[in-house]
Image (cartoon, rainbow, N blue to C red):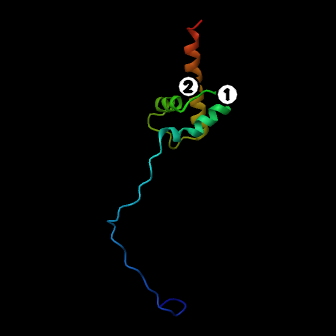
Amino acid sequence: MGINGKVVMFYSRRPNNMPKAKKPLSKPADRHIEIVDGLKALGLATVTTSQVGEAVRELFPKGTSGVEPGEVIRAVFVYLHRKNSGEKVGRK
């Protein structure tokens, strides 16, 4: 009996053998859209998701979970800026 005097019915637990819905895996490009947008706002207009993916793998080999998004954008900006500067030094 419940507080209001009516009968309370409880459902038995269902077996846990039902397959759980899996999250669709996000494409690497989808994960870096926010970083690309931040870099474009900082003046790197021609940055691509593949460049960002390479930089993130190099700078954060264990992943970016637990790292502030601003810190990731800053680190990738510096990485790409230095990389692009180094490539231009040898050209004439």
Q: Quadrant of residue 76?
A: top right
What residue type is disc 1 on? Gly
Q: Residues within 10 Å of mark 1 (few under 14, many from 20)?
A: few
Q: Residue furthest top?
A: 92
The local secondary structure at tag 1 comes to: loop
Residues under numbered marks 2 and 1 in contact, where contact means CB atoms less than 8 Å apart: no
* Res 43 label: 1
Q: Report whether 16 appears left or right of 77.
A: left
In this rendered view, identify the residue nearer to me: 28 or 85: 28
In this rendered view, identify the residue nearer to me: 14 or 69: 14
Q: Residues within 10 Å of mark 2 (few under 14, many from 20)?
A: some
**Residue at figure coordinates x 61%, y 38% from the top left:** 70
Q: Residue furthest bottom?
A: 5
Q: Earlier in the sequence, mark 2 or mark 1?
A: 1
Q: Is residue 32 above or below residue 1?
A: above
**Residue at figure coordinates x 59%, y 16% from the top left:** 85
Q: Is residue 87 above or below residue 26?
A: above
C-alpha span from label 2 to label 1? 14 Å
* Res 79 label: 2
Q: Position of residue 46 (x, y in %)?
A: 61, 26
Q: Quadrant of the C terminus?
A: top right
In this rendered view, identify the residue nearer to me: 4 or 43: 43
Q: Position of residue 21 (x, y in %)?
A: 41, 59
The local secondary structure at tag 2 comes to: helix
Q: Position of residue 48 (x, y in %)?
A: 56, 30
Number of numbered markers: 2
